[in-house]
Image (tube, helix red, strand yellow):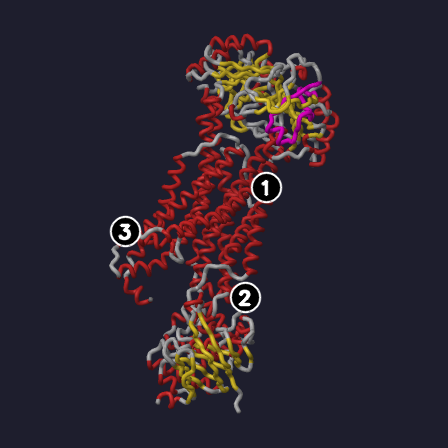
Amino acid sequence: MTEAAIQLKDVSLTLGEGASSVNVLKSVSLDVAAGETTGIVGPSGSGKSTLLMVLAGLERVDAGEVRIAGEVLNGKSEDQIAAFRGRNVGIVFQSFHLIPNMTALENVAVPLELAGAADPFGVAARELAAVGLADRVTHYPGELSGGEQQRVAIARALAPSPRILICDEPTGNLDQATGKQVADLLFAKAAERAMTLVLVTHDPSLAARCSRQVAMRSGRIEIDAAPAKIVA
Amino acid sequence: MAIRFSLREMRGGLSGFLIFLACIALGVAAIGGVNSVARSISDGVATQGQTLLGGDIRFQLNQREANQAERAFLDGLGTVSESSGMRSMARLPDGSDQALVEAKAVDDAYPLYGALQTEPPLARDALLGEVSGVFGAAAPDLLFERLHLKLGDSLKLGNATFELRARLVGEPDAVSDGFGFAPRLLISRKGLEASGLVQPGSLVENAYKVRLPGNASEADIETVRRQAAERFPEAGWSIRNRTNAAPALSSNIERFSQFLTLVGLTALVVGGVGVANAVRAYLDGKRAVIATFKSLGASGGFVFFVYLVQILMISGLGILAGLLLGAAMPFAASAALQSVIPVPAEGGFYPGSLALAALFGLMVTLVFALLPLGRARDVPATALFREMGFESRGLPRLPYVVIALAIAVALATLAIFMANDRRIAAIFVGATIFSFLVLRIVSALVQFIARKSPRVRSTALRLAVGNIHRPGALTPSVVLSLGLGLTLLVTLALIDGNLRRQIGGSLPERAPNFFFVDIQAADVDAFAALVGKEAPSGTLTKVPMLRGRLMALNGVPVDKVKVPPEAAWVLRGDRGVTYAPAKPENATLIEGSWWPADYRGEPLVSFSADEAKALGLKLDDTVTVNVLGRNITARISSFRRVQWESMGINFVMVFSPNTFAGAPHSWLATLSDKSATVADDARLLNAVTRAYPTVTTVRVKDALDVVNQLVGQIGTAIRAAAGVALIASVLVLAGALAAGNRARVHDAVVLKTLGATRRTLIAAFSLEYMLIGLATAIFALFAGGIAAWFVVSNVMTLPWTFLPEVAIGTIVLSLVVTVGIGLVGTWRILGQKAAPVLRSL
């Protein structure tokens, strides 16, 4: 059996306090094998983004166990999780979240520098070349198109060679053609590096490209199956 | 790595930090500049000590010349120059006009150092020598103007005639010989002798300035001083050396610079509010970047350091700009101060003063930036996924709070430690902290009242009241920034106003019209008769007057006694002393009893109560005074309440008459005549000077004019200092309003789409600024009023009046500033087109 990259056991999470509190995740359990590609779908407010944050160690759970890349995150300090994330988890955001005052090269080098990697700029340059932006290294985010910005973001997420790549609506801010190019790139890179890919999306065609789909509703996993079953 | 990241982050420019930069630069420039200027003056005094003192060492004797033994001792030290100074009346030969002068009689050796400058330049003999019974003299322009004289004209001093042969341009040792109320008249010693002004008991100061042979070291000078004290313990001379040429000036400059440093520090602290606002606004904008860093594996501590480094670099720029300004100040001031201070203030570079200013700037930055930085550390990475309201208020983690508090305490300690008068500095620092806390409470109160106020019909007023209390309102920043500056301004304006009122209003009403000094004992009755005839409605009060120096308290030499600064003047230099058989009419005994009229026992003294308390004296303690070269020890038999501000005849010490039996002395008299006109005063002055040319007459109104002028100059400096604090306030206010305006664009646009007119919006914003400005002004009046009352009635012990013009001025200023600056920023908002803003929402 393949080793599990992600293991959630009975994970619950409530956000807010008192009358305004919401049970965002209700006893969610999920195992994702290494190298698997998983699409998380569901209506707004179903808890899919929160689930993604839990996977990235960005949100602490109230109950249950979170084991990512073999490490239990419960009980770790914020800084320990940050360091863990730097080594093991790459994140791609819907709004790219590039740092505006840094060039494309510097943006990609940031996680490598934070992790103390050798030759961060050499690696960053290679990653940018790998996403087809070798001629854009000195450009600032403001000088790049949306698709290019997202490709920089993907290069940044891939640069430290994480075992898990987490994407939040990676094509949500892009037009259809650019979105397809970015999705192609994501899936190609994940396959090339045997990475575990988890993405949240509202786009059925993107979800359909994953080997597995998880549909969420009201904080619970409603369906967990191969894409065909959900579409049906 | 944090530095590398900081540098990358700062590529966006410093646009949000201009106010931050200006606040820090202003405060640092004020502190660095003031201290550099003070140092340049002190250095001027130190490097030119010989010239300013007129010798390496200076011995001063009052009312008497050195006796043979003393003179022999002085002559044995090196070259001696002897000069005598006294106040007297110079009058026109026909007696038609007269003026008070500070006569200074010099010998041929004068000056030992530096050069006497006259116009035209004349040799000593040609300048001051005698030609057929007429002596030469030099005087500054002021005396020429006052008596409408020209070169070659004559005037009389005592019984001698002097010809004004030159204008006095520069007198090297003027500062150590005292520059007083009246213009100088430089004459020769022979001329003074011929004038007959020097009589037993006359108030004459004889200075012996000595040039020591070779290159005398400080140790040599100290040896001379010790020898003089040992060999002539009863001489009663005050000895000064070249390193301490102008002690009064030095201590005044030090005191004033310390006051200005505290004001500069207030400006810096007010600016600190601007720093906090700027840092918070900047980090608010960087929220997504911080969250991105964290999602990429950065720790909270790393985030903190990245932004701390940025803030420190920006603050470094501000400090550098401030230091450049501060370093330039001595050069600018040396020209400006030349006419005010008789010491050549040389421009110069003073690293110590500038380093202190930089340290203050750095500490203020840290105190105010650490809390927002600490909060930034806790920006969650989840902020990228979910739009949560960034909790930019509230306290960060404990270590950041503790460090910020520790630096604040260190800042306060440093401010107090660096001050000369630590008590005043501590009060100042305490008051600033207290004002901070109270202003916080005031802003909370204003918001509370706004929240609880009933709903009004006017849309504009409703919007304004809503803006005052809603989350993220401008109220706290505006109240805090403007409140501190305004409070300082009100305090200084009220102190200045009260001081002027005293000098210009109530003092002259209570003060006598004239002081008459050096009335010879034999002339007292005839003098009284003359004054009685010339001013029949006036009241003449006369007392015997000697000069004495306090040498010891309870047998302990005064230089070994630790005294609080407010009583130091009693021990400094000579004091007028008197004796009286019966208790003076204006004295109130508060402890002990007066001696019988025919008392013959041990010398007794009645001491001024407040000064005795400050010096720690009790009944039956002894004081030793040196009068005319004799040490006299007297026992304190009573304490009197003395009203110094009445400007009548007041003495710290009144002795029993037997104390000075046989000592030659003159009399001091005052004339009070409330009904006298200016013409009456002029007539009396002329009559007295004609009949008694050796009596020195001081018209109180003239003296007060001089004081008034001096207070005016100090007032200008104080207002300039307060202005610096107010500029800092306005900068911070502008910054806070600008930051608020960004949020306001959204509101204005939404309101416009909902049908609000420009007029409604302007009215709403104006009302909001007015209400906040008014609340701040009321607080400033209250707090500034209490502070000024404390200073005027407790520190200066003067009657206190609240001045309505200051109140009105403060309110108007506050409203103009808040509404003015507020509307300038708002104008841009009103012109904002709705569509682009709505699209980006």
Secondary structure beneath dot 3 equals loop
Q: Left or right? Give the position of A55 relative to A183.
A: right
Chain of residue at mark 2: B
Vertical order, A4 against B677 (above or below): below
User: How many numbered marks are there?
Assistant: 3
Give whichever of B615, B145 is nearer the camera: B615
Q: In the rendered view of the protein, which quadrant contains the N terminus of chain B?
A: bottom right
Secondary structure beneath dot 2 equals helix
Give whichever of B688, B794 is nearer the camera: B794
Q: Amino acid at mark 1?
A: Arg
Work out whether disc 1 and disc 2 sit on a shared chain: yes
Work out whether disc 2 and disc 3 sit on a shared chain: yes
Residue assigned mark 2? B301
Return the disc, 1 or 2, that comes first in the chain's sequence: 2
Q: Residue B415 colored magenta?
A: no
What is the span of residues highlighted in magenta in the rendered image? B602-630
Res. B178 in view: yes
Within-10-Å neighbours for mark 3: few <14, some 14–19, many 20+ = few
Vertical order, B801 against B691 (above or below): below
Residue B722 is situated, as x and y percent measured from the top left of the image, at 46, 41
Q: Amino acid at mark 2?
A: Gly
Query: Which residue is rendered at x = 44% and y = 49% of the image?
Result: B480
Residue assigned mark 3? B458
Q: Amino acid at mark 3?
A: Ser
Residue B126 is situated, as x and y percent measured from the top left of the image, at 56, 20
Residue assigned mark 1? B422
Within-10-Å neighbours for mark 1: few <14, some 14–19, many 20+ = some
Vertical order, A135 against B797 (above or below): below
Q: In the rendered view of the protein, which quadrant contains the C terminus of chain B?
A: bottom left
Give whichever of B41, A100 is nearer the camera: A100
Residue B580 is situated, as x and y percent measured from the top left of the image, at 61, 16
Chain of residue at mark 1: B
